[in-house]
Every structure is written in structure tokens, then in C-alpha cells.
Amino acid sequence: MIKDRFRKYLPVVVDLETGGFNPKNNAILEIAATLIHENSETNKLEVGETHRYHIEPYEGLLVEQESLDFTKIDLNHPLRNAVSEKEALDDLFKIINTVRTENGCSRAILIGHNAHFDHAFLTESISRNNNKKSPFHPFSVLDTVTLGALHTKQTVLARICDVMDIDYDSKLAHSAAYDSDVTAQVFCKIINEFDH
């Protein structure tokens, strides 16, 4: 059971694209979360479904042009279908809490590549939206930078993928959904190989 692997924590990979580096001042532009499952026959971790939200920048927060240039996010794209932070968090947390309960886990734990960055932005968003239903541990995270350094001697996601023979397309990178899915692949493969 997945609850027995991580001390009753449900591992959930999270990736955010933001309008800068300051979680108090810069807006969140995208949120994606990828669920992790355990195959009951092989006892191996597997990448599950990814849930993605385009976010309307929270009123009063900054979006720096340099970040838009880097992420290639077009805030005015007609197909962007952005929702508020609150709407995204409410929906995402409902999904995660359901899976957490189904697996007998007490909390979710955020997995990320440079996880403290995503955790800091998520924590600020939870606070400003007065969300009481966050499934995530308030400060513990699992970081694929650290795991990657230990397992491959690399810290950059693309290089970790290269060493581990995981497909990585730099043209698709810096979309929350893509980065979340790739990070989940890295996490599962490292844990599975460690268990082996």
C-alpha cells in the first residue's frame, strides 16, 4: 500500500509556473498536480493522472515580462480558459483529498523539482485564499533535485532525464502539466530502482 511507503503520506507531484520568484509579490500563472499510484501486482510506483489549471493572476500581484518570456505563457490567449486561484485550489484539493482518503493516507506530501519553490507559492496562495482544506503537509516536501543528485549525480531535470533514459522535450518544458508529469516519471523511476 502506498500509505506504508511514505509514513501515511500520499505523494503528489506539483509544478507551478509563476510571474516571478517572490511568492508574496508574484502571481501564479499555472498549477499542475500529478498523482502517483502503486501497482498492486508489482508494488512499483506509477505515474497517474495530471490535473492542470491556467490561473488568472491574483489581483495586485506582479507578472514580470521576463517570466512570460521564459515560460512562453500568453495571458491573453483565447484558449487559455483561466480560473481563479481559489477555484483551482478548491477543485484540486477535493481531488487530492479523495485519493488520500481512498489510500488511507493522513496527508499529502508535495513532490517537486526545487520543491520548496512550488511549496512556498502554494502556501502563500492557500493563505491569501483562506483555504482550510489543504491536503499538503505544511512544511515537509520531497525534492527530485536531491533525489536526482543522489541517483544520477545531476540536479537539472533535463540532465537527470538524460541519465535515466526518460524522454524530455525542452520545447514542452516550463508548462506546469509537462514539468509535473516528467518530474513524476523521475520520482517513480528513482524510487522503483532504489527498491530494486
Image (cartoon, rainbow, N blue to C red):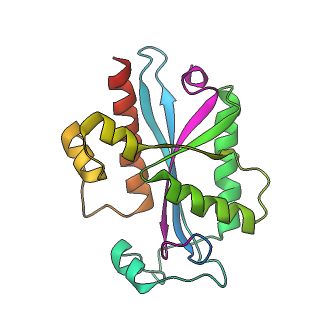
**Residue 82 location in percent, x, y?**
57, 72
**Residue 64 location in percent, x, y?**
46, 84
Question: In which image quadrant can residue 98 be found?
Answer: top right
User: Is residue 112 positioned above or below 85 on the image?
Assistant: above
Query: Which residues are the magenta region?
Result: 1-22
Q: In this view of the protein, which residue sits in the foreground, 149 or 60? A: 149
**Residue 161 located within the stretch drawn in magenta:** no
User: Is residue 159 positioned above or below 163 on the image?
Assistant: below
**Residue 14 located within the stretch drawn in magenta:** yes
Question: In which image quadrant can residue 7 be found?
Answer: top right
* Residue at figure coordinates x 52%, y 54% from the top left: 116
* Residue at figure coordinates x 48%, y 84% from the top left: 76
Question: Could you tell whether 96 is left or right of 117 in the image?
Answer: right
**Residue 68 location in percent, x, y?**
40, 79
Q: In this view of the protein, which residue sits in the foreground, 76 or 190? A: 190
Looking at the image, can residue 87 be seen? Answer: no
Numbered-mark total: 0
